[in-house]
């Protein structure tokens, strides 16, 4: 049934029309993040993401998102130290990861590992502020360690322990690449984490809020969100963008690729957004971070392909309000940082845990379990038939 026909369906009791994908339907009230899709503006707790990306750190931004205010120096120092103390993961989780198939996708490994934390911290004291603080610290601290650990384990190596003398982003790159990163690379990576930390009620955050509304533990909330983020229409797009750019090969081929994709009604990965009708403000900043990386560490010809595609799409997709989103340039930054392609979405998850936890806390603050309705379109009442009376048509 076409989207238009679907949208004309109304709920019998409430008269509310069906909105596929809940497009435009407010499912909650939130004070965490605001998006102006027409102007291309994004704020976290009122602060423009451009200012946070320029001046803040990921841990400071995570604190802001979760507790609502920028931390004082003492609050930030305490939070940084707590996160640093909880970076290590249990040998049990490490040994569990060693049983995962090396060919498994890192997002599946992350979802399993995040959920397993619920086994170690099973007390569900979600009305206890200390429990909430501890869960926030553990998840923010351990998710990067888990992502880096699976990378080494799937290569047949033992994971590297976190280094307490390295800040959050530098430590992740060290655990992943076994080399201490260049300070500029670590700073650019930290800015990428700020840009990916929160984005109102996107699919994975909605998933987190629905799971949180049942009052389950925060580890299940994050595992639920990780599974949602893994999809190619959501967080998984950043992996597919690089594959697409490699397929195109050169900026000269961009027009032809676009023509073919549009003829075949294929989506251009890294383009389009439910909220933005202009270029995603995060894509603007990520593009400049990519250029900063290339200026310092060497050019990447795929950037020229990306620019060619963006320019070619301006007339054809721009007219429909379809522009680059957060996933279009992020992969080029991560590729230059030496992050394997199938870890791009786990990196997205490292960052978005801050937003998921902010929404988890907010949901607990004014909870009502999510239970939307539906418009039934199945069979009317009918009697059971013995199997010998059934025909293939009726069984189909
Ligand atoms: C993220 O929600 C968030 O905030 C997500 C996110 C976050 O920070 O959490 O921003 C992160 O998920 C970014 C999006 C990453 N995904 C991709 O890049 C995959 C490609 N993009 C599309 O699948 C799509 O744009 C979505 C999923 C992002 C948004 O889809 P919508 O809002 O449901 O739009 P739609 O699929 O209903 O399309 C509306 C029209 C259609 O054309 P018509 O049938 O009406 O003629 O726009 C077209 C679509 O064909 N369209 C595209 C397109 N995206 C939409 N055409 C070509 N290429 C695209 N990328």
Image (tube, rainbow, N blue to C red):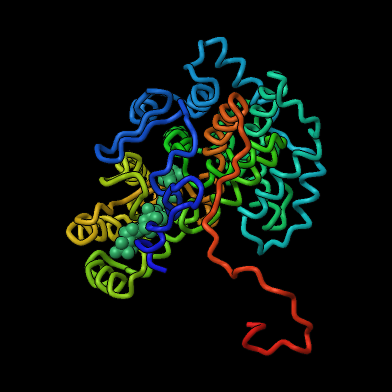
Side of 306 relative to 230 (left or right): left
Q: In this view of the protein, which residue sits in the foreground, 11 or 194?
A: 11
Vertical comparison of 184 with 388: above or below? above
Side of 288 relative to 65 (left or right): left
Q: Residue at x 35, y 40 (%)?
A: 282
Q: Residue at x 69, y 38 (%)?
A: 219
Determine the image quadrant of residue 311: bottom left
Location of ligand 1 given as a quarter of the image: bottom left
Tally of numbered discs: 0
Q: Position of residue 170 (x, y in %)?
A: 54, 34
For the N terminus, which image quadrant?
bottom left
Vertical comparison of 104 with 293: above or below? below
Side of 74 relative to 102 (left or right): left
Q: Residue at x 54, y 50 (%)?
A: 229
Vertical comparison of 31 with 229: above or below? above
Q: Position of residue 249 (x, y in %)?
A: 32, 68
Q: Position of residue 179 (x, y in %)?
A: 57, 42
Q: Position of residue 382 (x, y in %)?
A: 67, 73
Q: In this view of the protein, which residue sits in the foreground, 110 or 210?
A: 210
Determine the image quadrant of residue 85: top right
For the C terminus, which image quadrant?
bottom right
Q: Is residue 331 visible?
A: no
Q: Is residue 27 visible?
A: yes
Q: In this view of the protein, which residue sits in the foreground, 46 or 347?
A: 46
Q: As drawn, which residue projects farthest toward the left?
A: 315
């Amino acid at each position: 049934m076409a989207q238009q026909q679907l949208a004309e369906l109304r709920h019998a009791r409430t008269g509310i029309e069906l909105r596929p994908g809940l497009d435009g339907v407010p499912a909650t009230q939130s004070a965490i993040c605001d998006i102006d899709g027409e102007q291309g503006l994004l704020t976290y707790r009122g602060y423009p993401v451009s200012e946070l990306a320029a001046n803040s750190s990921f841990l400071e931004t995570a604190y802001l998102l979760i507790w609502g205010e920028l931390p004082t120096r003492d609050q930030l120092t305490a939070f940084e130290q707590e996160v640093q103390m909880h970076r290590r993961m249990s040998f049990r989780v490490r040994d569990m990861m060693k049983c995962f198939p090396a060919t498994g996708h890192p997002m599946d490994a992350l979802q399993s590992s995040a959920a397993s934390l619920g086994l170690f911290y099973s007390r569900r004291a979600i009305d206890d502020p200390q429990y909430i603080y501890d869960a926030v610290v553990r998840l923010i601290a351990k998710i990067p360690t888990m992502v880096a650990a699976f990378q080494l384990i799937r290569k047949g190596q033992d994971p590297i322990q976190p280094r307490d003398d390295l800040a959050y982003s530098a430590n992740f790159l060290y655990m992943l690449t076994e080399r201490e990163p260049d300070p500029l690379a670590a700073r650019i990576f930290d800015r990428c984490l700020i840009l990916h930390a929160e984005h109102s009620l996107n699919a994975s955050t909605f998933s987190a809020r629905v799971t949180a509304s049942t009052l389950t533990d925060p580890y299940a909330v994050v595992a639920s969100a990780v599974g949602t983020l893994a999809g190619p229409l959501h967080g998984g797009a950043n992996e597919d963008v690089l594959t697409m750019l490699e397929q195109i090969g050169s900026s000269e081929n961009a027009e032809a690729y676009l023509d073919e994709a549009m003829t075949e009604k294929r989506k251009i990965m890294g383009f389009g957004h439910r909220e933005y009708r202009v270029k995603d403000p995060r894509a603007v900043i990520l593009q400049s971070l990519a250029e900063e990386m290339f200026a310092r560490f060497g050019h990447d010809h795929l950037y020229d392909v990306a620019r060619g595609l963006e320019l070619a799409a301006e007339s054809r997709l721009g007219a429909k309000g379809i522009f680059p989103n957060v996933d279009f340039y992020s992969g080029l930054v991560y590729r230059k940082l030496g992050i394997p392609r199938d870890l791009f979405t786990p990196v997205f998850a490292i960052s978005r845990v801050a937003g998921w936890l902010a929404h988890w806390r907010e949901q607990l603050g004014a909870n009502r379990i999510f239970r939307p309705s539906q418009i039934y379109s199945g069979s009317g009442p009918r009697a059971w038939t013995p199997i010998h009376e059934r025909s293939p048509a009726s069984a189909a």
